Image: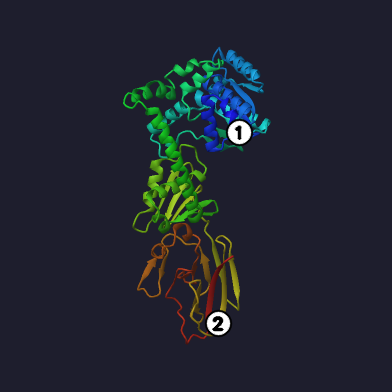
Amino acid sequence: MEGRNKLSKTALQVLETAEAFGLWQPGYRIVVAVSGGADSVALLHILHQISKYHTPLTLICAHVHHGFRAESDQEAEIVREFAESLLIPFEMTRVNIPQYVEDSGRNAQDASREKRYAFLHQIAAKYDADSIALAHHADDQAETVLLHLLRGSGPSGLTGIKIKRFEKNVELIRPCLRINKTDLVHHCEQYDLPYVVDSSNMSTKYRRNAIRLDVLPFLGQYNGQFTESLNRLAEVMSVEDDYMDTISRQTYSEMVRNSEGSLSFKVTDFKELHVALQRRLIKLILNYLPSNDDFVDFSRIETIRRGAVQHEPTTWSHDIGQGIVCIREYDHIIFSTQRSSVLEHYNYQLDFLDGDAQLDLTEIGTRLHLSCLDSWSRPVSASEALFDANTFIWPLTIRSRLPGDTMKVMGLNGSKKVKDIFIDAKIPPSLRSRIPVICDGAGNIIWIPGVRRSIHFPVSEDSTSIIRMLVEEL
């Protein structure tokens, strides 16, 4: 308790946040990102206070010299001298951001962020640090939530900036996220801490600056606590988003099947979910597939969801972009990063059966067994068929299906297209090319294994010689 009495009001707020969210433990090594602005200078000083009077911590000050402005050299020197005054190790890197922007074609803010985080992770690895502390504050949170809202974000975007999250085996923590910018500036003035003012922060050509300088003050006319309201919204949404994320991952593990790089679920199970969970599940599946950050949007999710809950059994295929295909095959929704490969046509012949024989159809991973029987017995499954050997027309042909194939189906007058037979049997389109078509010597389709048998060469109790065919997976 005595140690707490030596902490500033702002440091006590940070300590309260750290204890509520488990940001550190005694002895933690923390890399502190310090730009030289009031918020990051205050953060380093606050963590130094906490380390000195309350919780022992090892701090490392990390600064990125972006090379944007003439005063960058002076800012780097100010940060270095401040860190040394606190006896904190100082690490710095120089990055030519203007040149990187020109070479990469990225905007300045994204380029700066990429290089800054890369350096922070490098220093964290060098010191075997437990976490990287960033100086985002409550005003940053409000700006972020409003920015996401204007972009049309869903609930996850309204969570704003996370107080802590894991990235590349190190935790990113934001101890000041519940503190206003003015309180951090006041902390610097109270302790006479040196800090710099970035002149580029006053330029409204950057969207975030425009939000801070124009939009927030305008909306603040109608709600004097607007920044606080946005922060409360972020906190509420963060907890609820975490809960929904947990439920979504649990549902994923129970419902989604991963087979040969494709993710799928049953429509009947999907329809039992609440709409909110349906959308979350699709979003989670799309996030597991390789895509860009901005790929998973509401429109894409909702198109898939509506297609999945159609009342009529159906099949469809949507190329949803970035090499990802979503397919409905009756009661299954399938997500794949590759279109189903078209099998090459295959054709095997057997001139005559003398005893037992077998044929491996390696193209489709199937084996056909043939044998001769001298008495009739009923087939035990759809994978078996019997034919009268005395009337059979040789040679036997086993091939892949062809456009326009028809078959005289047992129990049905006339012929029927093989395509319609597959549709009636609800055979998924992706599996149809993997089912062999078996023909007699006259070219008649006599059997589609596992699907239908033809009227040709029927057997009865009076049959004295019978050909038995059986298919199984290799």
**Which residue type does callout 2 highlight?**
Leu
Nearest to the eye among marks 2 and 1: give it. Answer: 1
Image position, residue 98 (x, y; %): 54, 19
Query: Is residue 260 found left or right of 158 in the rendered image?
Result: right
Q: Quadrant of residue 85?
A: top right
Image position, residue 445 (x, y; %): 45, 69
Q: Residue at x 51, y 61 (%)?
A: 434
Of residues 261 and 256, the one nearer the viewer is 256
Residue 352 sits above or below residue 257 on the image: below
Of residues 373 and 263, the one nearer the viewer is 263
Residue 286 sits above or below residue 225 on the image: below
Q: Quadrant of residue 113?
A: top right
- Identify the mark at residue 131; answer none if there is no mark: 1
Number of marks in picture: 2
Q: Residue at x 44, y 17 (%)?
A: 203
Q: Quadrant of the N terminus?
A: top right
Which badge, 2 or 1, comes first in the chain's sequence? Answer: 1
* Residue on which the image places disc 2: 373
Image position, residue 86 (x, y; %): 64, 20
**Snapshot colouring:** rainbow
Q: Residue at x 55, y 28 (%)?
A: 134
Residue found farthest to the left: 222
Classed neighbour count for the residue bearing mark 2: other residues with Cα under 10 Å, few (<14), some (14–19), many (≥20) = some
Q: Quadrant of residue 50?
A: top right
Of residues 463 and 321, the one nearer the viewer is 321
- Identify the mark at residue 392; answer none if there is no mark: none
